[in-house]
Amino acid sequence: MGRRRGVRVAALGAACVALAACSTTSTTDGSGTPTASPSASGFTNPVYQGNVPDPQIVADGTRGYLAIATNGNGMNVQTLTSPDMVHWQQGSDALPRVASWSSAGKVWAPEIIAWPDGTYRLYYTTKAPQDQWQCLSVASSRTLAGPYVDSSTKPIVCEVAEGGSIDPSPFIDTAGRAWLYWKNDGNAIGLDTHLKVARLSTDGRSTTGAVTTLFKQTLPWEGHLVEAPSVVEIGGRFHLFYSANDYGSDRYAVGHAVGATPTGPFRKDPQPVLSTNAVAAGPGHDQLIKVGAQWWMVYHAWSPDAVGDESVGRSMWLSRVTFHDDRVDVSPPTSHVPQLPRP
């Protein structure tokens, strides 16, 4: 998400247990921070009002859900836990230590994926050995929430000549092939930005084979960059979501492209599928999760009266997603969502 700074998050208290008995009025966590309030007819956005940029939500078996986010609140990788994807409670640092070749302070856009051997991989952006740049690394854990350990001796991807590499996003297709998508951080040095993809090795700790450049910023709404790729496969089609423009403005938005293979070519939609409205500004850096039959998009957004204000930060929102062959519908940011994320 371009140039970012460290973040802070407020702790949440106890979740409302009986969903049908909860009102749709916002509650607080005891410190005055409003939290989402579910009801039998839906829930209130944002689902978490602390500062949690670049969120991802992963199902945690029968225990509910884990969310992770960019560094903040004294953690390299922030975590939140929830029984229902609506009420969230602060967890512990998923990555207590970064790789030995890096240093803390710029751990951005972490993403977790379950590996075929029953363990988990966490891909993240961190300082390069020359810390004016950022590159990609990977850590492993036997449990979803970690702690993750990074034993690497060098970055998994590090394109210093292109401004560095950020926003790693792992993906395993239905054929069992593992891929890593990312962005070269060209806008950091006045160059174009490109979304890229390469195969991952069998252990997920390195890339292998050719790197495919997918596309760069070409549409008027994208401004000077594209970033934050994420991919899902639906009916043999590969849907690539991405963010573009200035993350600290109300011009930031989510785009969509579709292709027949994980390496494309991808055809972009001409306009964003999620953008600023009266209740959420600059929505972006999304990930998708399927709960029951319904796909959901998790993303961050600024309050419209505090766009770019890091002291307020970016809260966590949910929108419903529906696929229609090559087309996708994403519900715009709305304060009340008339459907709960139920298995």
Image (cartoon, rainbow, N blue to C red):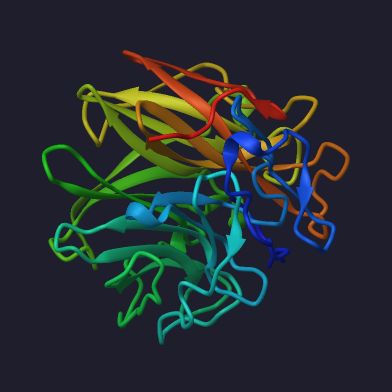
Give how far across and how far down residue 90 sits, in percent. 60, 65
Residue under the point 42% across and 84% down: 101
The image quadrant of residue 156 is bottom left
The image quadrant of residue 265 is top left
Q: Is residue 173 above or below residue 278?
A: below
Q: Is residue 98 above or below residue 133?
A: below
From the image, which quarter does the C terminus lie in?
Answer: top left
Give how far across and how far down residue 323 sits, in percent. 38, 18
Asked if residue 261 lies left or right of residue 85, the reply is: left
**Is residue 38 something one can see in this rendering?**
no
Asked if residue 180 lies left or right of residue 208, the reply is: right
Asked if residue 293 lies left or right of residue 222, the reply is: left
Residue at the far right: name it.
305
Residue under the point 52% across and 43% down: 192
Residue under the point 34% across and 15% down: 326
Residue under the point 72% across and 50% down: 49
**Is residue 66 something one can see in this rendering?**
yes
Which residue occupies the foreground of this view, 223 or 108?
Answer: 108
Which residue occupies the foreground of this view, 128 or 12?
Answer: 12
Residue at the far bottom: name it.
100
Q: Is residue 244 above or below residue 108?
A: above
Asked if residue 298 lies left or right of residue 203, the reply is: right
The image quadrant of residue 280 is top right
Q: Is residue 33 above or below residue 335?
A: below
Give how far across and how far down residue 80 sits, in percent. 55, 60
Which residue occupies the foreground of this view, 146 or 211?
Answer: 146
